[in-house]
Image (cartoon, rainbow, N blue to C red):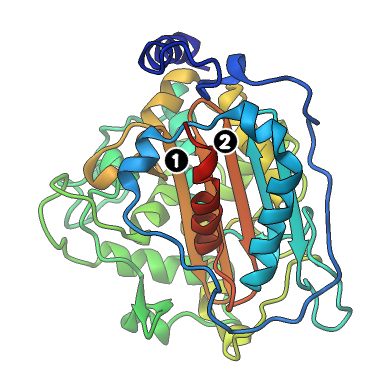
Amino acid sequence: MLKTVKISLCVLLSLITLGTVFSGCGKEEQSSDAETKPVATEKPTVQPTTAAPTTVPSTGDSAGEKQRRYNFLAIKQKSDSIYTKLDDIITENNFQGSVYLKLGNDLEFNKCTGSSDEFQRKKNSLHTSFYTGAFTQHITAAAVLKLSEDKKLGLNDKLNKYFSGCSYGEKVTVKNLLTMTAPIPGYTKKTGGKTVLADDLEKKIKKDNSEEKNKNEIEKWILSQKLKGKSGEKYSYSDSCYFLLGKIIEKAAGTSYTSYISENILKPLGMNSSGFKAPSGLASPYDDSDEKDNKLFFGGVGFSSFGFISNVSDTIRYIEGIFDENVINSDSLLAMHTAFKGGYGYGVKIDGDRISISSKLGAYSSKITYSTDEAELYVAYSNYASSDSSKLNDLFKDYLKEFCL
């Protein structure tokens, strides 16, 4: 878990802060009397509202992200008032979904609000399944790195090794796809604040199609596109990059993408409620009249780019698992968390030692942030279009500034 790096960082921070004990560096500086598993603190279902948040999050705090360290002694001493305030922030801003926050071993907060089923009025919980959106890309990146460790593919492999006849096959590498520095047009686009399929794909993707047919239509579309610039020059988000990585995983592993993920990531980590098939307990979308016909959720469309379904409990297992080297080794993890163009690593955005993944697809939103010293973890999923998991994270950070060193 990169202990040598963590220890060196802690020594440096201790010198800077004149020997302050509670520097937030790794588990060595945290007290050890916290619970190891979250305990649900669900409240009665509250009806959603589209009202604007009552608290406005700050913006442009990138510099603060790189330096943010918590005073864990103060957090432990005021934990009761912190729990109350975080609960109030959720209530005041009408957030509906499942939220988890851990700071060191001194604060572990979770709250679940809203309904996962509009007919049975079943409440959201830490075990409720949601579409996770961009979290899929973290999973995909981990699978690519594992295959690289096993010498089944190379990060410098060019696409023509996997896609014969691709017009840009000599210009784009696997690493370009991982870092989103391959200027391939995305197969989705933003229209009126919503994510929809690219125009040419809209009529070809159908609910009655098999997953393979929809995936084949998307793959053909991606490989027929022209690059929008020079590969490797700059970061440019494109879900096409991670769709192609899913196909490369299949070719390198000799099995389906979903089977490889299940056998090499989900099962070893005990992520028994996660996968790519919508379970019976999937949270229903709220506040979006077009959601039932949203083609982003048709079979095969999300695939290795945004098709992963999970819950808060399984997500915690995954984050813990990658640090425990139960998925990829420490060298691969360091590469994943190394910023390239635009502060993007492999499947994640990077700001100093803070890693973040955020997404909004239809009514579903997700936000996952964690620190590389494992002192901080935030996971939030929502199935309400009126809720924003990323905005809630900003509001939490604004409040917790008073506990920063």
Q: Residue at x 41, y 44 (%)?
A: 348
Quadrant of res 219: bottom left
Q: Is residue 399 left or right of 247 when viewed as pictured? A: right
The answer to which of 31 and 160 lies nearer the viewer is 31
For mark 2, give the secondary structure: strand
Pointer 1 or 2: first along the chain? 1
Question: How far is disc 1 from disc 2 in space, using C-alphas?
Answer: 10 Å
Q: Residue at x 22, y 55 (%)?
A: 165
Residue 259, can we see it? yes
Residue 162, can we see it? no
Type of residue at label 2? Answer: Glu
Q: Position of residue 90 (x, y in %)?
A: 66, 64
Q: Position of residue 256 (x, y in %)?
A: 56, 48
Q: Nearer the viewer, mark 1 or mark 2?
A: 2
Q: From the image, tell me which residue sits under label 1.
A: 355
For mark 1, give the secondary structure: strand
- Mark 1, Cα crowd under 10 Å, few <14 / some 14-19 / many 20+, is many
- Mark 2, Cα crowd under 10 Å, few <14 / some 14-19 / many 20+, is many
Type of residue at label 1? Answer: Ile
Q: Residue at x 54, y 74 (%)?
A: 53
Q: From the image, tell me which residue sits under label 2.
A: 376
Q: Position of residue 171 (x, y in %)?
A: 15, 46
Q: Residue at x 17, y 49 (%)?
A: 234
The answer to which of 318 and 229 lies nearer the viewer is 318
Vertical relation: 367 (above or below) 4:
below
Point out the residue furthest to the left here.
230
The answer to which of 13 and 186 lies nearer the viewer is 13
